[in-house]
Image (spheres, rainbow, N blue to C red):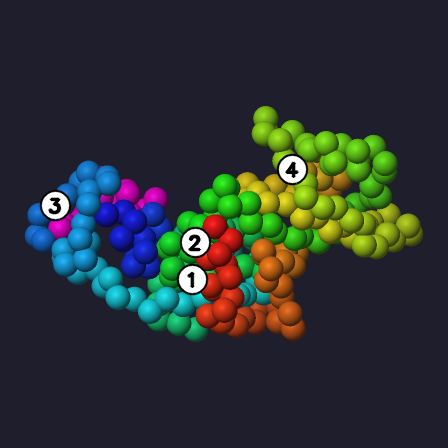
Amino acid sequence: MQKVIANSGYTSRRKAEELIINNHVEVNGEIINTLGFKVSGSDIISIDGNILNRQVIKEYYLLNKPREVICSVSDDKGRKTVVDLIDTKERIYPIGRLDYDTTGLIILTNDGQLANLLMHPKNKITKTYIAKIEGILNENDFKKMRQGILIENKKLIIDHVKVKEIDKIKNTSLVEVVIHEGRNHIIKKLFASLGYDVKKLTRVKFAFLDLGHLKSGEYRQLSTKEVKALYSLK
Ligand code: URA
């Protein structure tokens, strides 16, 4: 049942589970609070008395997230969210997170199935970041990155790393890093573990999708072909 609720675009799978456990969900008029309860296409699911619309139109957006926007559907501190930037009536949400001060590519959708697929670690979806760091990487840093770096007791595999620019006067570098992990603040933690501060961070690619000509704050819908190609990453 939690999967059906998430796939309808109503909320995430985790939140759907919470709703079920906390007696908010009824099937054909009866409260069901067990996870994994099987529902058929003809069952009527309601949440807090509202019938779940199971025929939602799926929407997919690619946004170039600006700084000072939060990757969430709402914020108790009243900060602007990525959802606020998209003109839609559907309940879309971001797939994964970028920090408040990170810019770049984020996908938003109401398709829970695709969101789960893209966030599941086993699918190893690659993400490409460009980090402006304080300092210049040395051979030893590259050696450590090639071996994989232990971050909070779990090894981070780096698929690719390349220095794109060095500013010797300002003592900063632009470094491109490709990883297939989704841990929070992972790039900042990676550089912190090597002793470098990240001054700016942008995600430039998510799987095969890039920012193209989108300026900060701009977005576009994904094409059917792109959505199919994302599904095929499973
Ligand atoms: N890694 C980070 O440190 N921050 C992000 O926003 C994304 C990846």
| Residue type indicated by callout 4 | Ile
Discs 2, 3 touching: Cβ within 8 Å? no
Residue furthest top in the image: 153
Judge left or right: residue 88 versus residue 20.
right
- Most foreground residue, 149 or 23: 149
Q: Residue at x 79, y 45 (%)?
A: 134
> Which callout, 2 or 3, points at the residue further toward the start of the chain?
3
Pick whichever of labels 3 and 1 is earlier in the sequence.
3
- Figure quadrant of residue 214: bottom right
Which badge, 2 or 1, comes first in the chain's sequence?
1
Q: Which residues are drawn in magenta?
A: 14-27
Residue drawn at the location 65% of the way across and 59% of the way down: 204
User: Can residue 84 be seen?
Assistant: no
Q: Which residue in the structure is indicated by mark 3?
A: 31
Q: Residue at x 85, y 36 (%)?
A: 139
Where residue 115 is drawn, which disc sits there?
Answer: 2
Query: Residue 10 location, x and y as percent?
Result: 30, 58
